[in-house]
Image (cartoon, helix red, strand yellow):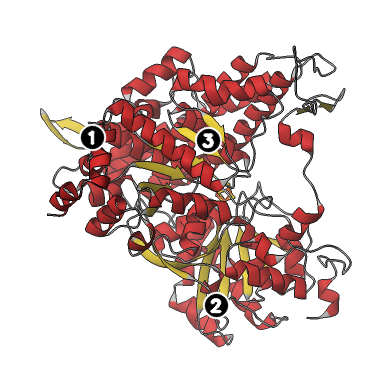
Amino acid sequence: MAEDKTKVAKVEKKQKVVDPVEASIDVATQEMIARAQELNVETVFDRALTMKPCNIGVQGTCCKNCSMGPCRLPLPKAGIEGEDERKGLCGATANTIAARNFIRMIAGGASAHSDHGRCVAEVFLSAARKETDAYKIKDTVKLIAVAKDLGVATTVEVNGEEVDRDIDEIAVETAEVALNEWGKPEGELLYLKRAPEARYEIWKKQGVLPRNIDREIVEIMHRTHMGVDQDYKNLIKQGTRAAIADGWGGSMLATDLQDILFGAPYPIQSEANLGVMKEDHVNIIIHGHEPVLSEMIVAVAQTQEMIDYAKEKGAKGIQLSGICCTANEMLQRHGVPLCGNFLQQELAIITGACDAMVVDIQCIMQNIANVAKCFHTKVITTHPIARMEQDNVIHIEFDEHHAIEDAQRIVKIAIDNFENRVVEVMIPQHKAPIVAGFGVESIEYHLGGSFRGTYYTLNDNIINGRIRGVAGVVGCNNARTRHNNDHIIVVKELIKNDVLVLTTGCTAIACAMEGLLTPESAAVYCGPGLAEVCETVGIPPVLHMGSCVDNSRILLAATEVVKAGGLGNDISEWPVAGSAPEWMSEKAISIGHYFVVSGVYTVFGVTLPTSGAPVFHDYICKEFEKIYGGMWDIEPDPIKHAHKMIAHIDKKRKELGIDRARERVLMDMASRQAIEA
Ligand code: BF8
């Protein structure tokens, strides 16, 4: 490595560095952390060792919403006896402060998902109006379904007869109605009626039906301004409105409109982990969340013109791969391999083989630009709202009106950079085969069967106990925990106990790398009931449902179960639980909250930023169950974490009176033989 290229991110020799095996369970990641240390390149894993988190911030009781503070209200070491007398300068209590901070996190998360959705809606409108050649409506079946849910007419009357309406007209009106959801002046979000009726009625009774997406987020910022809302129950009510506006609004629209534009996913094979990179190819890594540009990059990188150009420059071809949720988007629709999850972004550059890392929005560590300075990698930002200050970063602003040209420029930069590699390439030789691309529609196909066209068969397997319940395990990596460790322990414990797992985001990538996304893994890791179902229908026990905005798919799958019958009238009634074992982002808090208020018992790992305010903490972790049927919980130990979820699933089985069916399935050999026959 040339000396002058390694100045910026070098770790001082005397500085403590992390033990790679303690930092991650993944061998490829361990090898690359060791490689980083060999090259003296600092990573997030080292920084997590040297920088400790603020104890008061962790508790959620630091208020910095005005300049009289920050006011810090940590829990006394001996706990609180008698009245809690902690107050900020204005008198704000620990509960008020923690609730304000918590709902500001919801605002951050909901705005990230929803602004992503808005951007997709704008591209969708351009495509519907035929203002761009790059984007076309790909999935007209989904367009019709979404149009109906948004109240757009799909048929017209001609000469007294009902006939199909022109598809282009439907597309334009659907785009306009969808965009209106962000800022309409009156009414409520249209997708709320997609929830089970009983759920909608709970939201109505509680007065938390979101009016429009933007308003609920703005109102959080107003209410949490100094001297406004000072009642933790009223504050979290607004957090609830914004979280619902995310899950059943911005995120759901993002998923739907992406499916219409780029195609709804169906099961597809691919591979996962850093080993998908190829030394003799131009490696382009796409990182972030919005698939609008990366769809174009996938298309352009496959053209003969670009492949020939890469060969002219001495490469054997172009290898695309992805990090974070852009990766999940590209995987579920095109089979583009997963390079890694959140904590692996610096490591992909440290291979020395990443010719360009193209980033859009969210979860992009600023340090990738510092790491890139040690190598030849071009970091290319593409979004006007997400630029980087380092001078080695190239900005190519994406615009749907010249998307193909933008993508061509980016791919060419990567190809031209192939010959500039300065450091010996070291790509860890670890990758796993996967099957991804599950959605509401494909689960219906696999588990519901085309005969009934509903989730009935899934319900039947839950009722007869072969499937004990369903868990949504989602979320991030967090450098404060061992990379992927908790994801994998939680998921393996669940499937061992016959709980079918639906996953998205970085958990999905962790499961992919661990080999849990193959139908064959069922025989190895699952309890007998789940293994039997997976083997019969040929699905993995862990279903990759997409990116983090695609958690909306899990909400809709949970609703389909209710509709199919036999498992209660609401999401809160059937045996389902949620989990984010290694969460770190504000988006995770928004997702967790919309799961909870949709009726799902949801356990987070790591920590919850409410521990310094026990009254508020108990309100959302205990009292909430009486209001919403779902509640928060926190459990950092992954085995206990999984068993809390299983206990909840069993509680719901008992309430439904189907607990005995499961006992029969697991304990009575005769009934097992009858099932097999
Ligand atoms: O939105 S899981 S680290 S990549 S925030 Fe980010 Fe968390 Fe990964 Fe996708 Ni979701």
Visible in this render: residue 131? Answer: no
Sequence-wise first label, 2 or 1: 2
| Quadrant including the C terminus | bottom left
Could you tell me which secondary element the residue under label 3 belongs to?
helix
**What is the C-alpha distance between the residues marked 1 and 3?**
25 Å
Looking at the rendered structure, which numbered label has been put on residue 439? none
Sequence-wise first label, 3 or 2: 2
Q: Label 3, on which residue?
A: 592
For residue 463, which quarter of the picture?
A: top left
How far from the left and from the top, in percent, is residue 352? 67, 76
Answer few, some or many: residues within 10 Å of disc 3's Cα (few below 14, many 20 plus, some between 14 and 19): many
Residue that appears at 29% across and 28% down: 656
Instruction: Name the amino acid type tagged 1.
Output: Ala
Residue that appears at 60% across and 56% down: 342
Answer few, some or many: residues within 10 Å of disc 2's Cα (few below 14, many 20 plus, some between 14 and 19): some
- Horizontal side of 598 relative to 371 (left or right) equals left
- Horizontal side of 673 relative to 293 (left or right) equals left
Asked whether 131 or 115 is in front, the reply is 115
Instruction: Name the amino acid type tagged 2.
Output: Gln
Looking at the rendered structure, which numbered label has been put on residue 564? 1
How far from the left and from the top, in percent, is residue 534? 28, 56
Asked whether 223 or 379 is in front, the reply is 223
Residue that appears at 83% across and 68% down: 10
Looking at the rendered structure, which numbered label has been put on residue 429? 2
Badge 2 residue CB within 8 Å of ligand 1: no
Visible in this render: residue 505? Answer: yes
Sequence-wise first label, 1 or 3: 1
